[in-house]
Amino acid sequence: MNNKLFAVNQTFYGQQELDTAWKKYSGIAPFREAGQTGSRIAVVMSDAAELIALVLYLREAGASVLLLHGETPLETAKALAQEAGCKGLVFHAAEGGYWPLAEQAYVTGEAASLCLFSSGTSGKPKLISRSWSSAAEEIAAYNEAIGLDAGVTPVVISPVSHAYGLIAGVLSAMERKAVPHIATYTNPKLTLALLRDTPNHIVYGVPLTLHVLTSLASGFRFNRLMSSGAPMPQGLLDNLTKLADRVLQQYGCSEAGCISINGYLQASGDIGRPLGHIRILEAGTAHDSPKEIVIETGGSMIRTGDLGYMESGELKLLARVDDVINVAGLKVYPAEVENIISALEGIRECVVYRGRHPVMGEIVCCMVAVDGKVTPDEVRAWCLAKLPPYKVPAKVECVDKLPRTATGKISRKLLEEANLSQ
């Protein structure tokens, strides 16, 4: 009998290791009490194996878990845990790393839930709480939609402290009896070595990590690459389709988890068919008449904040509602401009955002991470040859790397605010 449940950096963990960890956790009073009282426990863990084991234990015990990024400083973690109404904080070690929090702020008596803060790319991060039963419903629908058997090995290069890595990459795989491999190597070449030893794989990453990984893979062909977190730039997608048998993309939001999957990605905005437990309440009917995507799941209506439309049963994503740029009455969708810029040789990444001119009003701005000596004038000339003038960035800034939030995402809102302050 195969006793392997998951692996971290090629070290396998099975039922015996899980039982040993759970026995240890059951001897820690706050963990037992959290399940009995329906309390929340915040978790900051850089050790992926212990994080998975502890989350599974707390879920089984009936407790709620707030996941925080593994590099969150202690005082910041305490403040976030307090804000979220947690009973306590586990900081990097279950034994000796538990910090009790102010009793009057506890949330108790709730259905056991997975809690997290939204990315904050469009404003202040907000607390999201999803019951473990709703996560189980998502996992069942996800596995039905993705159609992978136990022989396909997920290699997860996204943090398991995020819902994408934990639910889609790890828990969904374990449910279909696959053995997920979590790769936390700082050196991507070690991940490539793992993939060479695992030919029937699906890599769970975000556009940036997939770009870094594939750029080092001279002569290597990937089996399946899964992207999430942000629409993949078309230039990167075109490169990946030359290196992989299949490129996939999943789309979702913090409140609902995964909403749709595209199993054969060809255009960056094609976010695929909705999962079986998702009902689309509202979306546009064509590219020129998009609407905010509104869904229903588990009896709740969720406004995604994303602008898109349905075509032949599949969702097409154009932009965040708040990101659309109004240039003299004409709409500019940032992803459309980013896809053009990303196809220019020497561009690693780019982000298009709203700028403001004292006379002209809203203008298109962009920041590009470049290799070599790409100049702003070259970027503008490239755009002028491929886009109508109103979509061409009025301001182009070339940098070594794009600024990111603590969760690794790019915030157009923060770039816009920084531009206004200059």
Image (spheres, rainbow, N blue to C red):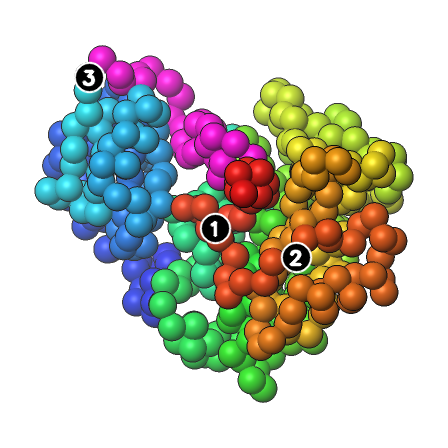
Alpha carbon separation for disc pair 2 and 3: 51 Å
Neighbour class for label 3 at 10 Å: few (<14), some, many (≥20)?
few
The residues tagged by marks 1 and 3 sit, at their Cα atoms, a distance apart of 34 Å
**Residue at (78, 66) in percent of width and height:** 381
Task: Label 2, secondary structure: give it.
Answer: strand
In this rendering, which labeled residue sits more in front, label 1 or label 3? 1
Q: What stretch is highlighted in magenta?
A: 103-132
Q: What kind of residue is marked 3?
A: Glu
Disc nearest the viewer among 2 and 1: 2
Q: In which quarter of the image is residue 324?
A: top right
Is 189 inside the magenta-drawn segment? no
Compute the Cα span from label 2 to label 1.
18 Å
Residue at the spot of label 3: 103
Q: In this view, does 238 lie above or below 256?
A: below
Residue tagged by mark 1? 404
Dividing the picture into quadrants, the one containing residue 288 is top right
Label 2 or label 3, whichever lies nearer to me, is 2
Quarter of the image with the C terminus is top right
Q: Check residue 396 in the rendering and tell me which mark sits there, or answer none.
A: 2
Q: Are marks 2 and 1 in contact (CB under 8 Å)?
A: no
Residue situated furthest top in the rendering: 104
Residue 387, percent across and down?
A: 84, 57
